[in-house]
Amino acid sequence: MLAACVLVPAQDRFGEARWQRDRAQTMLSHELVKAERYELVADALERGDESLIRTLVASQLNLVPAGSAEQAAIVLASSRPDANILASVEPEIPTLPIRRVRDTRLRRLVMDEDKRLWLLIGGCICAAIGLFRRPGRAIGLE
């Protein structure tokens, strides 16, 4: 009982820390992919990639070169308030790991502060009885 009162809460905290670490790693890898994609777009802008610049001008400024039906379609699509040309650069939103906790009676007992106190007291009493009992004699028999 004494060991369970100490080890189960420690294991629960360890599981929580591992879950938070996994979430942080997932979010970090997502942000690294996102930064890499934005770097590619920035490099293309610095190089003067004509198709990217036309797309940005058409979607952000609603300007279309004369006689360009393709760009006119982009302007119509981007006239919505929620349109964003850089949305295609964004990676998919990652699925974060879910924390799974095995809900057992022992866990419920030792995770509840009041019940854990009673378990500790009972464990100490059992340990004291085991320590102070004379070997070779049963308790209560003479």
Image (tube, helix red, strand yellow):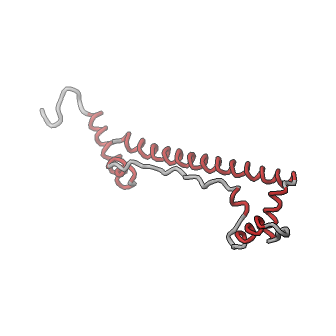
Q: Give left or right: position of 140 versus 108.
A: left
The image quadrant that residue 132 belongs to is top left
Q: Give left or right: position of 33 versus 42.
A: left
Residue furthest to the top in view is 136
Q: Is residue 69 above or below residue 16?
A: below
- The image quadrant where one finds the C terminus is top left
Q: Looking at this view, is 37 or 106 the one in front?
A: 37
- The image quadrant where one finds the N terminus is top left
Q: Is residue 23 above or below residue 138?
A: below
Residue furthest to the left in view is 142
Q: Looking at this view, is 132 or 37 the one in front?
A: 37
Q: How many marks?
A: 0
The image quadrant that residue 112 belongs to is bottom left
Kindly identify the residue that appears in the image at 30 percent across and 42 percent down.
Answer: 125
Kindly identify the residue that appears in the image at 34 percent across and 48 percent down.
Answer: 104
Q: Position of residue 118 (x, y in %)?
A: 33, 51
The image quadrant that residue 83 belongs to is bottom right
Q: Looking at this view, is 26 or 12 the one in front?
A: 26
Q: Position of residue 68 (x, y in %)?
A: 81, 66
Kindly identify the residue that appears in the image at 27 percent across and 37 percent down.
Answer: 129
Q: Give left or right: position of 75 versus 131.
A: right
Q: Position of residue 75 (x, y in %)?
A: 75, 70
Kindly identify the residue that appears in the image at 77 percent across and 67 percent down.
Answer: 69
Q: Give left or right: position of 133 versus 66.
A: left
Q: Position of residue 51 (x, y in %)?
A: 81, 57
